[in-house]
Amino acid sequence: MLLAVAGLKDDELKQRTRRLADGKWGGFSPAERLAFGFAYKLSRKPADVTDADVDAVVAAFGPERAVDLIWYVGWVNYMTRIADAFQLPLERENVFARPPAKKP
């Protein structure tokens, strides 16, 4: 949904989602691949995240954006676990999408 808010069209969202889901991130920039790998590791095995992992994120993004990345990944994981615990359904519609223009 956030990518739609950022302006990606439906077909672009589907393509990007497929590329992310397959785990083959070769078409992404080195910084994006680093962020995806870090997020994956922090999500799956947070105890395995090392100082070297954090240092690499800081080197690629700078300290402020590294904090943003680490915080956001942690927050998304937290919200996912809360939603799963309460068995909350996913929204079927993009709640951030602009309503369709009314025809005159």
Image: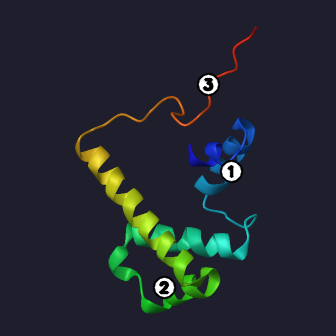
Q: How far apart are labels 2 and 1 at the CA level? A: 25 Å
Quadrant containing the C terminus is: top right
CB atoms at circles 2 and 1 under 8 Å apart? no
Q: Residue at x 30, y 53 (%)?
A: 81
Q: Dot 3 corresponds to which residue? A: 99
Find residue 14 and report its image quarter.
Answer: top right
Which of the pair 51/8 is nearer the observer? 8
Q: State the image coordinates of residue 1 (x, y, percent, origin top left).
A: 56, 43
Q: State the image coordinates of residue 73 (x, y, percent, origin top left).
A: 44, 65
Q: Secondary structure at mark 3?
A: loop
User: What residue type is disc 3 on?
Assistant: Pro
Q: Dot 2 corresponds to which residue? A: 54
Which of the pair 93/27 is nearer the observer? 93
Q: Residue at x 47, y 76 (%)?
A: 67
User: What residue type is disc 2 on?
Assistant: Val
Q: Dot 1 corresponds to which residue? A: 16
CB atoms at circles 3 and 2 under 8 Å apart? no
Q: State the image coordinates of residue 62 (x, y, percent, origin top left).
A: 59, 83
For label 1, count other residues whose C-alpha is less than 10 Å away and answer few (under 14), some (14-19) or many (20+): some
* Disc on res. 7: none
Find residue 37 and report its image quarter.
Answer: bottom right
Of the numbered discs 3 and 2, the one sitting upstream in the chain is 2
Which of the pair 47/70 is nearer the observer? 70
Q: Is residue 48 left or right of residue 34?
A: left
Which of the pair 49/58 is nearer the observer? 58
Q: How far apart are labels 3 and 2 at the CA level? A: 40 Å
Q: Secondary structure at mark 1?
A: helix
Q: Nearer the viewer, mark 1 or mark 3?
A: 3
Q: Secondary structure at mark 2?
A: helix
Which residue ends up furthest to the top in the rendered image? 104
Of the numbered discs 2 and 1, the one sitting upstream in the chain is 1
